[in-house]
Amino acid sequence: MTSTFKSSKKCLYCGEWSVWKQEPTDTCEYCGALLDDEKLLRTAAREAARNEKKRFDLDIIQIHPDDLGFVVFYKRIIQALQYSFIAIISFIIWFLTLLAA
């Protein structure tokens, strides 16, 4: 048995009633505006937070524009050491994976 009731929502922009499937991307039938802007923003923020958690982030030392010359020099040396360490570890992981296969 199917239900004959349909959900509808009043558009905030034009004031007309439109069919609302309770999806974040539902738009007004008359003006094309989103019926639930807040829900779409919450969904986008939740997805961005989920993607941020998945991302692997390395803490490489940052060089700021207001750093002095000798500080930049030493930070460049530290960056080179950090990148070298990452490259060596990556090579070892690749090599061990190659041996395991």
Image (spheres, grey):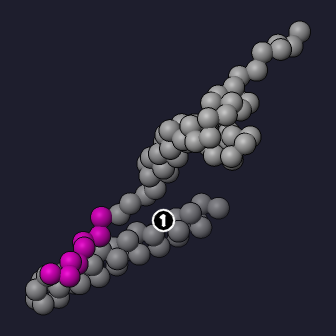
Quadrant of the image for the N terminus? Answer: top right
Q: Residue furthest top?
A: 1
Q: Nearer the viewer, residue 51 or 96?
A: 51
Q: Nearer the viewer, residue 57 or 91?
A: 57
- What residue is drawn where x is 73% and y is 30%? 19
Q: Nearer the viewer, residue 47 or 37?
A: 37
Residue wearing tag 1: 93
Q: Is residue 60 magenta?
A: yes
- What residue is drawn where x is 62% and y is 40%? 14
In the drawing, does residue 44 fall left or right of residue 4?
left
Q: Residue furthest right?
A: 1
Above or below, comparing residue 30 to residue 8 in the picture:
below
In the drawing, does residue 92 fall left or right of residue 21?
left
Range of magenta residues? 59-66
Which amino acid, by three-letter code, is at mark 1?
Ile
Badge 1 marks a residue whose secondary structure is helix
Q: Residue 2: horizontal and vertical position, in percent?
A: 86, 13
